[in-house]
Amino acid sequence: MSASSHRLFSRQDIIGFAILAAVIFIVLPLALDSFRLNLFGKYLTYAFVAVGLVLCWGAGGILSLGQGVFFGLGGYCMAMFLKLEASTPENTAIQSTPGIPDFMDWNQITALPWWWEPFNSLLFSLIAVVMVPVMFAFIIGVAMFRRRVGGVYFAIITQAFAAILTILIIGQQGYTGGVNGITDLRTLQGWDIRTDAAKETLYYVNGVLLFACLLIAQFVRKSKLGRLLIAMRDQEDRVRFSGYDVASFKIFIFCLGAGFAGIGGAMFTLQVGFMSPTLVGIVPSIEMVIFCAVGGRLSIIGAVYGALLVNWAKTSLSESFPELWLLGLGGLFIAVVMAFPNGLAGIYAEHIAPRLAALFAKRQTPAAVPKPKPAE
Amino acid sequence: MTDKKIPNALAGPSRRAFMAGGAALTASLFAPKGLRAQEFPTAEVNTTGLAVTDDAVTIGILHSVTGTMAISETGSVQAEKLAISQINAQGGILGRKIEYIQEDGASDWPTFAEKARKLLVNDKVASVMGCWTSASRKAVLPVFEQHNGFLYYPTFYEGLEQSPNVIYTGQEATQQIIAGLDWVTREKGAKTFYLLGSDYIWPRTSNKIARKHIENFMEGTSVVGEEYYPLGHTQFNSVINKIRLRKPDVIYAIVVGGSNVAFYKQLKAAGIDPAEESPMVLTISVTEDEIRGIGGENIEGSYACMKYFQSLENENNLAFVKAFKEMWGEDMVIGDVTQAAYLGPWLWKAAVEKAGSFDVDKVRAASPGIEMTTAPEGYVKIHENHHLWSKTRVGRAQADGQYEVVFETADLVEPDPFPEGYQ
């Protein structure tokens, strides 16, 4: 092992982070009007999930088809706080019971359920955004990984959780808003989140949070833990026989991915203005895996681009061909997976990075910098 | 083929003549005939930067054309496009052709919100015809209110809403429910009801209203059961057993979507034939569109309560059905919501011409009191509360998938989205 691989950032990583930062914080805001920027803000919330999936799936070999659960839990925690703030007695004077969320009133509920009460507090809600998904992931993780459930069985079970949670939310509509979800969210501590200025601010907040998650992910990957994860993915038994507690590492990384997804869900709620079970179920969960696959499941930066690209394609295809766009999108996925199994990151690593590195090297000190080594 | 073509060719001119007559009628009610764009300079009719030019005005169509709701919403899209083409054939609105931008909500509520924002913020459309499910309407509502858009919403729905930015062209729950319950009690002597529905806001709210009406507003009637099943549920055997035990006079069914197929088939398989009327089946959720999936022979003899049936025999409707089939194919069926969607562009045209402006605030102010005498369902009028005064009808399902109208309220029923005593 060379010294450079112990460093948090290799030169390539620095280039990757710098370009991504430039894209998110400079290029997109300059190039897009506020409506499109808000859309990209929404796409970036999915990037949180995709980055989490790179850690779980790409590095750890844990394929979760239920990340929508954590995205949804984070989003619902945020939405509950915002809904309570929007449901002041003055705003809801028309209801039979003023002061409770409108959908509760429609379902003949006359008092706020006890478990909604804590969500009056912003601090509690922000903690819950991360901790509720993490706790849920922890329970699933303990139940699954301690029993050495893995691989395809784990994937199917997570999918079942996505289905269960959706049914639960839809079934308990008096407490959750049902199919409609929690809608008509207005202000955060008095700050109107619906204005263009607010959406722009939220976009940058979203970007900063995403970078924080990316840095954590980068740290995990470069640490000893990251190496262990890869070892577990490739030869789980050997790692176990070497004396490592494989289950604990898996639980940790699964919880981390869930926490990221929760933050993404909360940012989604803030930027889109509502939360609904359509973001929790099996289909969105699988879509999230697709973002990750298109971006490249081994690259955290690639995952961000994957989320952006797929969602942007979805929006622009559906705007141009409202009745045929799903076919086009399907074709795009097949093409990417067939031609570039490592996704966007694979394309970058194979074709762009060597040239960039060469260019970079020439500019600096042509003789001193060795050629980039093959991936270790 | 030739058989079909000849009557069509013959009917073409007469239909056009009729539609022109209808237009003359509409025009004479609201504005001088033969409006020319020059008389309405763009700067005056559009002071808020909407997509209005000297010869065109752009509106949005926002429905699901992909995903699970596509099958229901396609009829609405078709009806709206028909209305737009007919309005354009008559010279458009204030001398301007209507152009439309169609967006796909993809049966996904966040997508609806995204597309609504796109239509209002990017495309600056003057109005939007759109949404179908309550969930999609709830998702776009804040967007319309924030950006001051104007939505024409076609579906019969649960009420409890009255947005300044929406015109509800379908019936709200009390309009649809009360007249039907009164009819079944009066004409069929029904005393006991079993309420049944899919588990979401519309069936629950509707059944709440039905229960209040049965228990508090009618004599000697009672509810003997109330049950809900998740969307997409296909096992109704247990509830059918309960129904056989409790022997209600009426099964009041608000089952939606694909569940209907299973429900009516299992009902018949269990020996409860709606045609025998013991118990009878009364529904508010099965239009001609749904019967196509259920199969006429499975539902024959059930009663549906809504404001429109394709079989209505008035001149407006005959012309509408003919035009619809000419544009979209002979095998099309037209349900209640499709007809309500058809009203949207016409009501908007009337409001714009009354206001003499495309500005949303002025169109909103002009909307209450707008009348439409050319509606396929007959005469409708916009209420102060943005819903329509409309008649309620009861139809009996036929084996051919159509309804035979057996009852119609004498007067228009007043919309009451926040009914007192029913909360």
Image (cartoon, coloured by chain):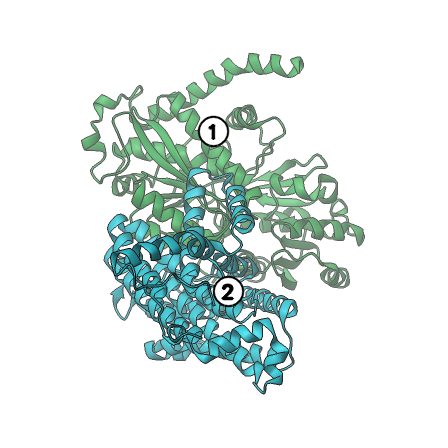
Work out how far the residue at label 2 is from the one at label 1, CA to CA, in angstroms. 40 Å
Query: Which one is in front, B366 or A158?
Result: A158
Q: Chain of mark 1?
A: B
Q: Residue furthest left?
A: B43
Residue A90 location, quadrant: bottom left
Please give the name of the residue rendered at 40% of the width and 71% of the height, measured from the top-left corner.
Answer: A218
Q: Secondary structure at mark 2?
A: helix
The type of residue carrying mark 1 is Leu
The residue tagged 1 is B82
The image position of residue A340, as x and y in percent, is: 51, 51
Judging by colour alone, the chain drawn in green in this rendered image is: B
The residue tagged 2 is A68
Vertical placement of residue B421 versus B400, above or below: below
Label drawn at residue B305? none
Vertical placement of residue B99 versus B202, above or below: above
Q: Is residue B64 left or right of residue B298?
A: left
Q: Chain of mark 2?
A: A
Q: Secondary structure at mark 1?
A: helix
Same chain for the residues at labels 2 and 1, yes or no?
Answer: no
Please give the name of the residue rendered at 77% of the width and 63% of the height, measured from the top-left corner.
Answer: B245
The type of residue carrying mark 2 is Gly
The image position of residue B107, as x and y in percent, is: 51, 49
Whether residue A308 is visible, yes or no, is: yes
Query: Which one is in front, A150 or A103?
Result: A150
Judging by colour alone, the chain drawn in cyan in this rendered image is: A
The image position of residue A358, as x and y in percent, is: 34, 55
* Quadrant of image for the N terminus of chain A: bottom left
The image position of residue B178, as x and y in percent, is: 54, 51
Query: Which one is in front, A64 or A354?
Result: A354
Whether residue B410 is visible, yes or no, is: no
